[in-house]
């Protein structure tokens, strides 16, 4: 799987729908990946910035956390499963940033030592020298990656996109942190895929901002840059009053910046612009039936095993798979009624609707495939 396939939602998460259902019923299914979203222990804030388009902006910090030792124990368990090991661990966040967690280096190092593919999604406002060195280790497995959310081409557009005050200087720090990683990996001949995401909003979409953003990221050494448009987060149902462009605004912005992005199409760094919702005709907040819990579950910042990255927060507790503070990973993962799986899942879908959980684009894609394959069984 190439990095380009990964960032354009072309990853194949399962061989066939029938085989997936069979494994679910037999309780032999093993997740394609596990997303770990550790929440910062100290302080009231669990993320660095109050981004208005944050998918987890409606989340609350109830103070619940896994102990650092328990996190390490859970990673141990993923590498010792009854039906196989989880070979890919993603460190990310819903209303959080994994690099804001005090013990993130320990978690990532353990995954690297296990030979697990690692993925890191971060705004990269800070990174320890220790983690920079870990990411250039010869133990890094092929297809491991770091994706940096930048969403701006200079201080002004960056601050507006992230709801920061005008005098804050963060953008250049992020660019310099990217350079630390890419230069260190290059010096050690390690191939860690480094990509950047630029969510295009109504405040960072000028041709000049986009062009400057591309130039800065290419100079920083990234392998790819993806321009895409944010989805409405949970708790927001209208575009009015937000920086998130509506359908008509997306069309206009797309037409404006596509010629700029096309200028870089033959460069070493892959620069792409996608309007995925239009391409896949996504106009709903979620696609049911949902199979996320069997393919890519997530550990939420409060220590619960959740269905997916988009339901990893306190207000989804009634649809969580279990509290990992007192339940082992595989016990929580296989805690479902396999004898009446279709009825069990229908009840779970009712909770999803009630809690207003929303699919991200990879979830829409996979669930659309399963919906077409499985017909009216749900």
Image (cartoon, rainbow, N blue to C red):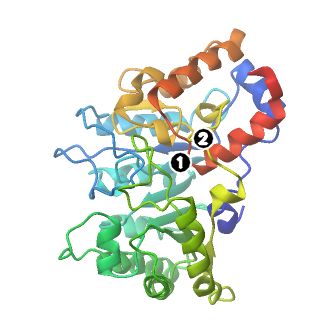
**Whole-percent x, y for residue 244 in the image:** 44, 60
**Whole-percent x, y for residue 258 in the image:** 62, 80
In front of the other: 266 or 35: 266
**Callout 2 secondary element:** loop
Q: Quadrant of the N terminus?
A: bottom right
Q: Residues within 10 Å of mark 2 (few under 14, many from 20)?
A: some
Residue drawn at 55 percent across, 70 percent down: 227
The answer to whether 370 appears left or right of 174 in the picture is right
Residue 177 visible? The answer is: yes
Mark 2–mark 1 Cα distance, whole angstroms, equals: 7 Å
Residue drawn at 59 percent across, 21 percent down: 334
**Whole-percent x, y for residue 353 in the image:** 52, 27
Label disc, if present, on residue 86 of the rendered structure: 2
Label disc, if present, on residue 89 of the rendered structure: 1
Q: Quadrant of residue 300?
A: top left
Q: Is residue 246 above or below residue 342?
A: below
């Amino acid at each position: 799987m190439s990095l380009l396939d990964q960032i354009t939602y072309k990853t194949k998460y399962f061989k066939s729908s029938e085989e997936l259902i069979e494994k679910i019923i037999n309780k032999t299914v093993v997740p394609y990946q596990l997303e770990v979203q550790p929440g910062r222990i100290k302080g009231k804030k669990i993320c660095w910035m109050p981004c208005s388009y944050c998918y987890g902006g409606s989340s609350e910090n109830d103070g619940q956390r896994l102990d650092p030792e328990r996190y390490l124990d859970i990673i141990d368990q993923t590498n010792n499963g009854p039906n196989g090991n989880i070979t890919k661990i993603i460190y990310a966040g819903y209303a959080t940033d994994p690099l804001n967690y005090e013990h993130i280096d320990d978690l990532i190092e353990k995954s690297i030592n296990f030979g697990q593919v690692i993925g890191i999604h971060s705004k990269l406002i800070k990174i320890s020298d220790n983690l920079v060195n870990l990411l250039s280790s010869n133990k890094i497995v092929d297809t491991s990656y770091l994706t940096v959310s930048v969403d701006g081409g200079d201080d002004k557009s960056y601050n507006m996109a992230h709801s920061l005050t005008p005098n804050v200087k963060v953008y250049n720090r992020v660019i310099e942190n990217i350079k630390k990683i890419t230069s260190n990996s290059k010096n050690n001949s390690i191939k860690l895929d480094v990509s950047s995401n630029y969510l295009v909003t109504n405040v960072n979409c000028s041709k000049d901002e986009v062009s400057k953003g591309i130039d800065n990221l290419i100079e920083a050494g990234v392998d790819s840059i993806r321009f895409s448009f944010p989805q409405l987060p949970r708790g927001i149902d209208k575009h009015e009053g937000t920086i998130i462009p509506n359908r008509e605004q997306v069309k206009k912005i797309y037409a404006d910046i596509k010629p700029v992005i096309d200028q870089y199409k033959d460069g070493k760094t892959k620069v792409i612009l996608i309007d995925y919702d239009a391409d896949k005709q996504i106009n709903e907040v979620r696609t049911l039936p949902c199979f996320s819990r069997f393919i890519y579950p997530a550990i939420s910042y409060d220590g619960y095993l959740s269905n997916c990255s988009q339901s990893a927060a306190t207000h989804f507790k009634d649809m969580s798979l279990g509290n990992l503070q007192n339940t082992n990973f595989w016990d929580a993962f296989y805690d479902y009624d396999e004898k009446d799986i279709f009825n069990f899942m229908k009840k779970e879908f009712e909770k999803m609707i009630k809690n207003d959980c929303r699919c991200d684009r990879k979830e829409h894609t996979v669930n659309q495939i399963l919906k077409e394959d499985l017909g009216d069984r749900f």
